[in-house]
Image: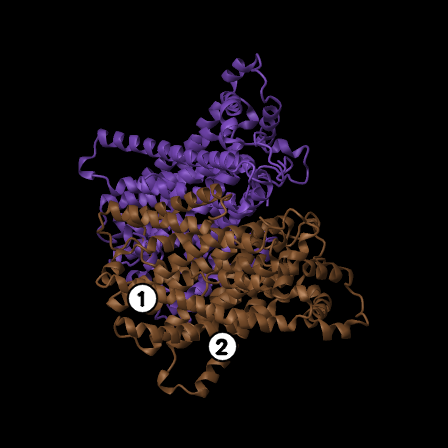
Chain colours: A purple, B brown
Amino acid sequence: MLSSFVKGINSDYASIVSINIFIALLCACIVIGHLLEENRWMNESITALVIGLCTGVVILLVTQGKSSHILVFSEDLFFIYLLPPIIFNAGFQVKKKQFFRNFTTIMLFGALGTMISFVIISFGAMAFFKKLNIGAIDVSDYLAIGAIFAATDSVCTLQVLNQDETPLLYSVVFGEGVVNDATSVVLFNAIQNFDLAHFDVVTVLQFIGNFIYLFLASTFLGIAAGLLSAYIIKNLYFGRHSTDREVSLMMLMAYLSYMLAELLDLSGILTVFFCGIVMSHYTWHNVTESSRVTTKHTFATLSFISEIFLFLYVGMDALDIEKWKLASNTPSKPIALSAIILGLVMVARAAFILPLSFIANLRKKNAHEKITFKKQVLIWWAGLMRGAVSIALAYNKFTSSGHTQLSINAIMITSTIIVVLFSTVVFGLLTKPLVCCLLPPTKHDPTGSMISDISTTSFTDPLLTSEIEIGSTLRPSNLQMLFTQPTRSVHRYWRKFDDRFMRPMFGGRGFTPFVPGSPTERSLPEPGTIPE
Amino acid sequence: MLSSFVKGINSDYASIVSINIFIALLCACIVIGHLLEENRWMNESITALVIGLCTGVVILLVTQGKSSHILVFSEDLFFIYLLPPIIFNAGFQVKKKQFFRNFTTIMLFGALGTMISFVIISFGAMAFFKKLNIGAIDVSDYLAIGAIFAATDSVCTLQVLNQDETPLLYSVVFGEGVVNDATSVVLFNAIQNFDLAHFDVVTVLQFIGNFIYLFLASTFLGIAAGLLSAYIIKNLYFGRHSTDREVSLMMLMAYLSYMLAELLDLSGILTVFFCGIVMSHYTWHNVTESSRVTTKHTFATLSFISEIFLFLYVGMDALDIEKWKLASNTPSKPIALSAIILGLVMVARAAFILPLSFIANLRKKNAHEKITFKKQVLIWWAGLMRGAVSIALAYNKFTSSGHTQLSINAIMITSTIIVVLFSTVVFGLLTKPLVCCLLPPTKHDPTGSMISDISTTSFTDPLLTSEIEIGSTLRPSNLQMLFTQPTRSVHRYWRKFDDRFMRPMFGGRGFTPFVPGSPTERSLPEPGTIPE
């Protein structure tokens, strides 16, 4: 059964050469990215993309333009190996309180917003593409284009935004990115299996029901996997801790949750994200101190390598000459298409950020918890980048196993690549200056500046109160709080439930049994709280 | 160029199922291995092997014996993904002083001993196999059989021997294992390209010259890669340490050294082993404390997962039904062959361990530094296991891309599997009791018992003296020492050279520049000194 998986990896000379080039380039990206760290325009994603492009050019020159297959983008490499560590680490390092505090906003943007974006891009493409006369495109293709370009790329943005400087922005943009990835992949798969001939209310309801099922089932699977790992490590390993076994088990179970979700046709992205959250809340506190340091940095490192690999890969793939030859009969068309798509993406994003922010602000009584217009602009901007998810979906739709046969397909692929490259490089380069411009850095003034970032004050608050109130009874004002501040009150009830039932069973901060030789070190903060 | 590497990984349903099964089994192995830890007979390798066998049986039953390809053993999966982390970690965690102290013995056993073993097994096979009438086998096949079964499997043994309880045995068995792996792979490749028609003194000399070149070039490449990583991290990262980047760079450069060696047709095993040694001596001291903890445990964890994966894989592969059907026309022959090979392996190993130990003992003046007969027996026993290297080489020789066509090839493959399973399970199970019997545990008596293990006293010695003597001039007695104790004196000169030239350039213990915010923590011991 593994045969097809294993047989493909053949160590012929060419693949050894390419593995060598690839690893050397990864090292170069890390070193150059480090040297450029002070630069306000650059980040590691763009560095990797540029290095990938340069390498592609060099290889094209060396092979004298004959190598039409420098690289064939494999969506499986992307979805099976590169995406899981990135998303898992995101869940593992995310500031949980901040994330759940903004949960409604995140779901509004990530699920409803992506749907709106999908509809606008699909209909916009229908309206504009017909004028270009690019060939036979049917309705399912337009819907696929909508789904492909509704997928934002949060990886690049996250390298610019700082979790400690702008926690609200970070958690909203990042949370939206995860939910958005899941939504667009689910949308894309739903369209592929969609019977357009029988388009009525029932199918729409089925679609929505299916989406909710996927969301809940994926989340449940991730939480179950996380809790299982916590339970195993807490109960079986008591008294005889072994760092290697603990770290192995955490890595393997996280990956297992992702693959299990893929097996059950759920969203692996959501599953592994929630698995990461649960593992950082329970499992991480049950292991030895050295396991904690190791997992924290190992997951971050694997995610870091995957991200660089991804951008390097996209950069090199952009120069696959076969597609360009097919598309070059009509050189102006991919550029026109890309321009239209970029315009649609910008309009579609604005079309849901502004009204949904208004709705999200309605729920917030406190004036400085609202999403200001400046922040809305930043959230809008931060989600304009299109990345590897778009490319993976486009390849899935418009190619068969990496090869483009029809001219129209080649045009669609090249357009996608242009959109991804342009948005990542141009928008990406402008993000850091834009953040600095709209939200001047407040780091060096730790007292007064915190007010300028609305959520910093509310961030430190629950941590302190919940720590103090462990085991204490509900205050008289709680019923009043439930009315005025529902999220906080839900959080309070959750803490009580967590302390009374979950932690005694699954471990967690303060509930780790004492192990001789592995002192339960309290001084080490949670994964999300140290900026690295 | 990466296309062939990437395209093969296809996420069809069957491979997702098998990845799920495999990861779940890995988790099961870790948990069961942990539960069986107290058991004196079992270890994780045997657990994985048995679980692999059981799974194979279950899959055979579920598919009603029709699935002839549950698994096809891929030597590339083995050599490209599983072996490098195991060997690198071995180099990274090895006690360097102990290893270099026994360097001559290790080289005698690993290089010369493997050659002797190869010759005896080849000629023995020639003598005995002809009587079995198993088909057309030519001289190159016999030589290949010699090389295949000269490769010992050190992984299983290392799980039984303890680096702190029996440092001499551990370093000799382990060092021999690494050199032996390299020697047998080099031998095997040399035979494949060997022109048997022109067998004369010149070809033999060429062969020896080639071997020495391979050994030196591989070692040099590994050292160069390690030093380069140390240099980069020491100089570029000064003042702005980032754990993720440091860990990424160490992982990638170690892997790059392996792949580069494979690209240049050198021995990647030797390269990555020496890269690990250099990295633990220089690079590891240049990084932040959290990077140190992370790398130490990450490398151990990756190695641990690879080992379990390997044994699980070998266990499942043993039931590939196609080979058994081909070989089952003559069911007695594989068993007869395996018995002959096992006998030859035991004789061949005894034939070099005893005389070479005698030679090694000649060099040692000190009575309790000699390898006693009991230890010789243990070294002999510890190298009887045959493992994944043998299987990988046998598949390379007797199959084309995992499929066996001829009956004789099927017989050879099944015989190899029988030898590997039998030696790993039966010999492996008996190793722990044998160690206990021949070398009673001395752990609980830390004062008097150390003398029973000859090298413990000499181990703590150089660490202390060298730390005290940093920067001091040579003592008058050094010339005398060079005469009586050459190894120690070489070590002393090396320390002086290291302190004066290498460490100021490449960093290392005590030469790491002070970095604000990342205190140069001296309390954390070297990778090799903490048993986990």
Q: Residue at x 58, y 60 (%)?
A: B169
Give the amino acid type for the residue marked by disc 1 in the picture.
Met
Residue at point 38%, 78% (across, down): B193
Dot 2 surroundings within 10 Å: few (below 14), some, or many (20 or more)? some
> Which residue is more in the foreground, B346 or A114?
B346
Q: Is residue B303 above or below residue A288?
A: below
Question: Would you call the spot at circle 1 few (<14 residues within 10 Å), some (14-19), or many (20 or more)?
Answer: many
Where is residue B181? Give x, y as percent.
Answer: 47, 66
- When the figure is inspected, residue A480 is found, relative to residue A348, above or below; the finding is above
A529 vs B159, nearest the viewer? B159
Protein chain holding label 1: B
Q: Which mark is residue B211?
A: 2
Frontmost of labels 2 and 1 is: 1
Q: Is residue A71 visible?
A: no
Would you say B105 lies left or right of A264 here? right
Task: Quote the CA–CA distance across marks 2 and 1.
Answer: 27 Å
| Residue occupying the far top of the picture | A476
Q: Which mark is residue B508?
A: none
Residue at which label 1 appears: B412
Disc 2 residue type (three-letter):
Phe
